Amino acid sequence: MVMDGSHMKPEGATAPFYLPQGDEVQVFQAAAAHKLPVLLKGPTGCGKTRFVTHMAAKLGRPLHTVACHDDLSAADLIGRWLLKGGETIWVDGPLTRAVREGAICYLDEVVEARKDVTVVLHPLTDDRRILPIDRTGEELEAHPDFLLVASYNPGYQNILKTLKPSTRQRFVALEFGFPKPEHEIPVVARESGLPEAQVQPLVRLANKLRAMKGQDLEEGVSTRLVVYCASLIHGGMPVDRAIRAAMIEPLTDDPDVKAGLRDLVTAVFG
């Protein structure tokens, strides 16, 4: 099953909160104006999906979000024939709907999908901007407002799961990282409701955990998890319990590593 989150935002609708870290908003707007596909690169939970949602609302375009996974095939994106009410009907997939209506199609973690998916994307990511649908004999020309956006986490990829250069070079690329503390603190405070003074040590701890990536940890703590932690604290949970639930347990199952992380928490919070 495809997980397709479709959202319609009328022109001028209030965009979800997003605090720019650089010129990514301007680059995305320019890419959209020139009908150029966009690739977002960065670690899990650093704000890529929030950024796309923000930009879709800012541009006044519908958004179809597809969470890619190992079983996601080209047919899941394009569509298929289904039996309904005694007759066989064609049902568009999220990519086809976006191509027809001029929406943004966001493929989250695109490298997780099967290899036939990237082949389907190629005609949409060059000057042809077409989507051939073999099963119906159609060759759809993309609506002028159609925009393809994909994301992936380079830190998780290996030789078996990566984007080929021939695919990467079809996109304008934006690299995302975790925000600097002066940006992350107000973001976490806004999202969680916890005062900035209480968020500050959580962000300091998060950056120390991120420094352990590639050593004891496979991945650093995401901004999303920091927000979760702050939200639990804001709701009345003790700080140490919230940190364990949102910033330690999600990162590792190794008892020794967890013990080391708890020592780090003590060093930061006293």
Image: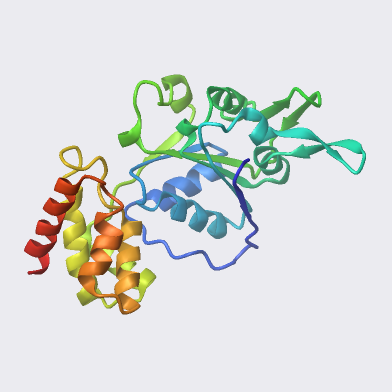
Q: In which quarter of the image is the C terminus?
A: bottom left
- Vertical relation: 162 (above or below) 194: above
> Horizontal placement of 115 versus 163: left or right?
right
- Percent position of residue 182, x then y: 22, 64
137 left or right of 95 in image? right
- The residue positioned 45% from the left and 56% from the top of the image is 50
Q: Where is residue 213 in the image (x, y as percent from the top left)?
A: 20, 42
Question: Going 21% across and 75% down the picture, which residue do you hit?
Answer: 198
Instruction: Decide: is 169 above or below 76.
Output: above
Looking at the image, the residue that sits furthest to the front is 255
- The quarter of the displayed image where residue 225 is located: bottom left
Residue 100: give x, y in percent of width and height. Answer: 73, 41
The image's colouring method is rainbow
Asked where in the image residue 71 lies, by quadrant, the reply is: top right
Left/right placement of residue 228 relative to residue 107 reads left
Residue lying furthest right? 86
* Residue 183 visible: no
| Residue located 63% across and 40% down the image | 1
- 46 horizontally vs 133: left or right: left
Q: Which of 17 and 197 is in front in this view?
A: 197
Depth check: give the residue in front, 266 or 144: 266
Residue 95 visible in this rendered orientation of the protein: yes
Q: Give the mark count.
A: 0
In terms of image quadrants, where is residue 184?
A: bottom left
Q: In this view, does 218 lie above or below 55?
A: above
